[in-house]
Amino acid sequence: MDEQATRTTLERIARTHFHQLRDRKDPLTGQGSDSADFIDTGILAIRAALEEAYTCGWADAEAHHSLQD
């Protein structure tokens, strides 16, 4: 996965699991404001986001590996 595809995937994951980030133009860039940059997030949302990111990375690694065979 190239850098832009990775960023797009991470932004999608962030918007999906962290409702505070859904309406931001660039959800993974600091806003220069504590109230915007530090959000209250439940542990289950964090876990789900991490699991999805891990799964995406694993799938990308498998796809890359199978292309090399």
Image: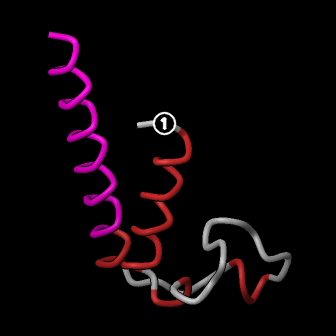
Tell which of 21 and 65 is nearer to you: 65
Q: Is residue 13 above or below residue 42?
A: above
Residue 14 in the image, given as x and y percentages of width and height: 46, 71
Kind of element beneath mark 1: loop
Q: What residue is disc 1 on?
A: 2
Q: Residue at x 48, y 36 (%)?
A: 2
- Span colored in magenta: 47-69
Is 47 placed left or right of 63 in the picture? Answer: right
Tell which of 68 and 62 is nearer to you: 68
Residue 28 in the image, given as x and y percentages of width and height: 62, 66
| Secondary structure mostly taken by the magenta-highlighted segment of the chain | helix
Q: Quadrant of the C terminus?
A: top left
Q: Is residue 62 magenta?
A: yes
Kind of residue at badge 1: Asp
Residue 16 in the image, given as x and y percentages of width and height: 37, 79
Tell which of 36 and 62 is nearer to you: 62
